[in-house]
Image (cartoon, rainbow, N blue to C red):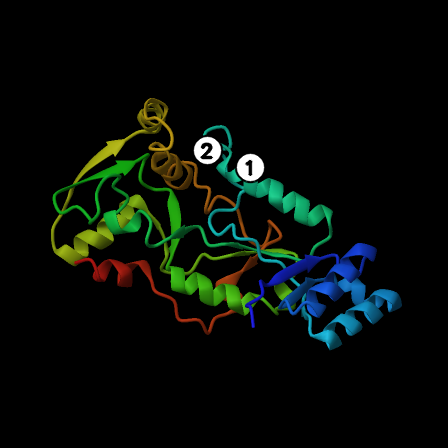
């Protein structure tokens, strides 16, 4: 039998959506329907959902968009990121306008990006003699290993505490400034590095002089380690939830543990 494509239908309790789902099932497509919680309180919509579910549709109650990174509604670099974050914000606003249940995962930076070079653009391994520190070196950023991001995300899928919330990942042991990262690395290699500080105005000049997309790494460094876009706001006060508090059982990799593998 010919393998059929998977089909996701949003609005399967509507007039057209319901029939789309029916025929998708009839023609043997693996069919998934994304529904709002309110649909279960409407007798007509509930009847349709039960009918589609009985016919073989998989009912989904939450949408987790692929926006893993910094919170696009919190970053302070919207005028210099080539709409990188504004496009993500636009998707958020469309989701919320349609009353689609969601969870946004803000994992900040993945450990596989920038950390292997100790935030040194152009390098593939951490330096062992001199290191560039952007800004004053005291603004904290967040790194999370990709496998750990996946673990937190899957835990959030059916958790009512994350419904229509932003799930932030700021694991203890993964929130450090550039100066602190350098100190951790120095302790592991048993050697002090010469620090070259690049103040904010010089970094902005470099970003402006470097053509897109080559300047984006510097833009992200500016966002995280100068503007503090990962850590300038309080999670609870912003209306978000803290993944490490919700799921304390997850054993995640710390920055120190990760840097140990690079020695």
In the picture, residue 204 is in which quadrant?
A: top left
Quadrant where the N terminus lies? bottom right
Q: Give percent across and percent down for residue 59.
A: 68, 69
In the rendered structure, find residue 70 and report the number of the disc placed on it.
none
The furthest residue to the bottom = 54
Q: Give percent across and percent down for residue 55.
A: 73, 75
Query: Which SS class for mark 1?
Result: helix
Q: CA distance from mark 1 to mark 2?
A: 9 Å
Query: Which SS class for mark 2?
Result: loop
Residue under circle 2?
81
Q: Does 61 sit left or right of 171 as displayed?
A: right
Contact between marks 1 and 2 (CB within 8 A): the answer is yes
Q: Does 170 sit left or right of 157 as displayed?
A: left
Q: Nearer the viewer, residue 195 or 1?
A: 1
Q: Does 36 sit left or right of 73 as displayed?
A: right
Residue under circle 1?
86
Q: In the figure, 154 relative to 125: above or below? A: below
Callout 2 crowding tier (Cα within 10 Å): few <14, some 14–19, many ≥20 = some
């Amino acid at each position: 039998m010919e393998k059929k494509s998977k089909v996701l239908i949003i609005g399967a309790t509507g007039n057209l959506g319901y029939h789309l789902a029916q025929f998708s099932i009839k023609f043997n497509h693996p069919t998934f329907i994304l529904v709002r919680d309110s649909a279960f309180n409407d007798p007509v919509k509930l009847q349709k959902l039960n009918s589609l579910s009985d016919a073989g549709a998989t009912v989904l109650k939450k949408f987790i968009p692929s926006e893993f990174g910094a919170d696009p509604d919190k970053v302070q670099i919207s005028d210099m990121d080539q709409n990188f974050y504004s496009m993500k914000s636009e998707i958020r606003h469309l989701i919320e306008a349609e009353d689609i249940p969601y969870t946004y995962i803000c994992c900040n930076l993945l450990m596989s990006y920038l950390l292997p070079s100790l935030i040194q653009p152009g390098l593939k391994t951490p330096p062992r003699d001199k290191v560039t520190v952007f800004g004053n070196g005291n603004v904290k950023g967040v790194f999370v290993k990709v496998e750990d991001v996946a673990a937190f995300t899957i835990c959030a899928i059916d958790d009512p505490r994350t419904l229509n919330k932003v799930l932030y990942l700021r694991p203890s042991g993964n929130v450090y400034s550039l100066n602190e990262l350098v100190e951790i690395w120095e302790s592991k290699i048993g050697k002090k590095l010469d620090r070259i500080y690049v103040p904010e105005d010089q970094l902005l000049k470099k970003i402006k002089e470097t053509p897109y997309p080559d300047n984006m790494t510097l833009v992200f460094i500016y966002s995280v380690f100068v503007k503090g876009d990962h850590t300038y706001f309080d999670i609870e006060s912003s209306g978000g939830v803290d993944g490490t508090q919700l799921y304390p059982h997850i054993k995640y990799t710390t920055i120190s543990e990760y840097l140990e593998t690079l020695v």
